[in-house]
Amino acid sequence: MTPLEVLDAEFAGASDRAAAIVAAAVIDDALRTLLAAVMVEDHPPGLDVFAPGQELGSYMGRVKIAFMLGLIDDSERMRLSLVAKVRNEFAHLAEDISFNTPRIADRCRQLAAPEELVPPRQVPDALELEMLHEFKTPLANRNDPRAIFEEATLFLLYILKGRFAQAMVRRPSRPSKFKNAAEPAGEFLARAMVAKRHAIEAGDPPDKIAQLRDEVNRLANIVVFTAAGANKKYQSGND
């Protein structure tokens, strides 16, 4: 079963409380997978940033970092946050509440997915191409908060899978070690040279270009100076 089918199956027959909590858990797992896609794979054993109490140990911590890393857009961040709020309403309150409770229903309406982005809940094994022009994705009843919530969380899982595919091409490798003091200075110099070229091509003000030129010259001197002594061991006055 695909993750979409798993989540859809979990919704079937589940209470409102169970549906909200399970949906958030499945979305949370997809967020963790998304973030892991842009991390180096060969990290030391025991280094788990996703463990409770660690840097990415909470659902909202993962949402915020995913947004700050450019892995999700602002509308996705907003909807992921709403899923957490709905989950928290059900998880933290002992009172008898449901998706029809006004404050939860209001959040579900805010959570509603754009109609053009709602994925089909089921795709037939065999496509009848001549009938595709008649196909329309069934949409949730806009007067049914639970139906909206289910559709929105299926949509978010679908979107996060797409974001994961985008993120995979961005996965970094562990950087190689600098061999001497000139190498990090050289990285700064390369950045400054690119910035100067862009400023000249963009026709930036002369004072900005002059400032960048001075920075390039200064960094070039640092590179030359550090390279000259990079491979020499320190000699004390008593040697």
Image: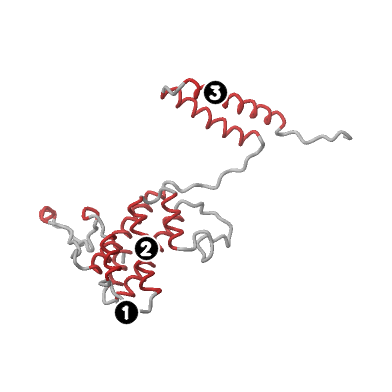
Q: CA distance from mark 2 to mark 1?
A: 25 Å
Residue ranking furthest to the right: 238
Q: CA distance from mark 2 to mark 3?
A: 49 Å
State the image coordinates of residue 193 (x, y, percent, origin top left). Answer: 52, 27
Which tag is nearer the camera, tag 2 or tag 1? 1
Q: CA distance from mark 1 to mark 3?
A: 68 Å
The mark found on residue 27 in the picture is: 2
- Nearest to the observer: residue 82 or residue 233: 82
State the image coordinates of residue 185 (x, y, percent, origin top left). Answer: 61, 33
- Nearest to the observer: residue 62 or residue 7: 62
Residue ranking furthest to the front: 102
Residue identified by numbered label 1: 96
In the drawing, does residue 34 fall left or right of residue 1?
right
State the image coordinates of residue 64 (x, y, percent, origin top left). Answer: 43, 55
In the drawing, does residue 105 fall left or right of residue 130?
right
Residue that appears at 21% across and 53% down? 116
Q: Earlier in the sequence, mark 2 or mark 1?
A: 2
Q: Earlier in the sequence, mark 1 or mark 3?
A: 1
Residue identified by numbered label 3: 213
Q: Amino acid at mark 1?
A: Asp
Q: What is the crowding at mark 1: few (fewer than 14 residues within 10 Å), some, or many (at least 20)?
A: few
Q: Secondary structure at mark 3?
A: helix
Q: Secondary structure at mark 1?
A: loop
Q: What is the crowding at mark 3: few (fewer than 14 residues within 10 Å), some, or many (at least 20)?
A: some
Question: What is the tally of numbered marks visible in this picture?
Answer: 3
State the image coordinates of residue 190 (x, y, percent, origin top left). Answer: 54, 30
In the drawing, does residue 156 fall left or right of residue 115?
right
Q: Secondary structure at mark 2?
A: helix
Q: Earlier in the sequence, mark 2 or mark 3?
A: 2
Q: Amino acid at mark 3?
A: Arg
Quadrant (top left/top right/bottom left/bottom right) for the N terminus: bottom left
Q: Are marks 2 and 3 in contact (CB under 8 Å)?
A: no
